[in-house]
Image (cartoon, rainbow, N blue to C red):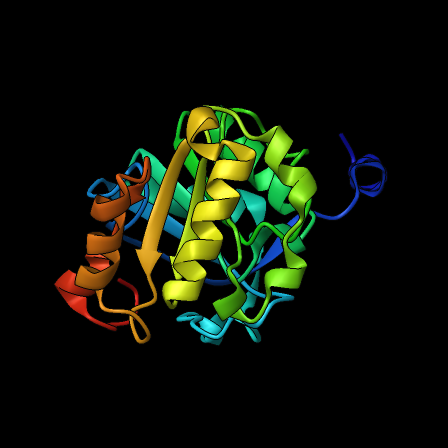
Amino acid sequence: MNAVTDAATASVAGPPERLKLTEIFLSLQGEARDAGWPTVFVRLTGCPLRCTYCDTTYSFHGGQWWEIDAILAEVARLGAKHVCVTGGEPLSQKRCLTLLERLCNAGHVVSLETSGAIDIAGVDPRVSRVLDIKTPGSGEVARNRWANLPLLTAHDQVKFVICSREDYDWSRDVLVQHRLHVVCDVLFSPSATQLPARTLADWIVEDRLPVRFQMQLHKLLWGEEPGK
C-alpha cells in the first residue's frame, strides 16, 4: 500500500476514538458486589450532577484525552481481570459505550458506576451497571431517570447513599414501590460525613430490610489517599 492509499484509508476510517480521562489505576474494589477484588479503575472526566457528598469532585474538570486503544493497553498492563468504569459520570461521554463493549470483548469482568441520570439502555448487557438512585439529601433527587429502573436485570446493582433518617425512609419507600430487591442487588451506604455507619446498620436490621449494607472498603484501608 502506498502513501496515497494509506491516507485515503485513514480518511475513511476517521480519527481514533478518544475519551477524556482523569485517571487509571489498580486497587481493590471497595464497593458493591465485587468488593475486595483487585480492580482496574478507569475514571472518566466530567459530571452534570453536583451531589452534596461527592468525593470525586476533582474529576469534574481537566483530564487528558486518551485513545480507546491506549486505555485498553493500559488496562491490560495493570493486569487485573475486573475493570470498573467510573467518574464523574462516565455516560456523559458517548464513547464510553464503545469502551465498555471493547473491555468486555477483551475478556474483562466490567462494571459501570453511573449516577442514574442518563439513559443506560445502550450499555453492553455484559456490563454490571451499578446505578445510583439520588436521595433528597444528595441535592440531585430531581435528576433521577426513573425510566432506567425497568431496564435493570439481575446482573445489575442499585445503590442509595443515605444522608439522614429522611433519606432512609425515602429510600425504603422507593425500594418497596419499585420492588428493586426482587430485580437485583440493592446497596445502602451511609454518607460518610453525614450519617454514622452504625446508625444506618441499626435501621436496616430493625426493619429487616432486604438490602445489602456497605461501607467504602478502600477508605477504611487507605483513607483519602489519591489513586486508591
Quadrant of residue 50 within the rendered picture: bottom right
228, above or below 213, in the image? below
Q: Quadrant of the C terminus?
A: bottom left
Quadrant of residue 55 within the rendered picture: bottom left
Query: Does residue 103 appear anywhere in the picture?
Result: yes
Residue at figure coordinates x 62%, y 30% from the top left: 151
Query: Does residue 215 appear anywhere in the picture?
Result: no
Tell me residue 211's x, y (percent): 32, 39
Residue at figure coordinates x 42%, y 35% from the top left: 110
Residue at the front extreme, as displayed: 206
223, above or below 206, in the image? below
Q: Is residue 174 left or right of residue 220?
A: right
The residue lying toward the viewer, choosing from 160 and 171, is: 171
Tell me residue 56's x, y (percent): 43, 70
Tell me residue 162's x, y (percent): 38, 61
Quadrant of residue 64 within the rendered picture: bottom right
Residue at figure coordinates x 69%, y 39% from the top left: 147
Tell me residue 33's x, y (percent): 31, 37
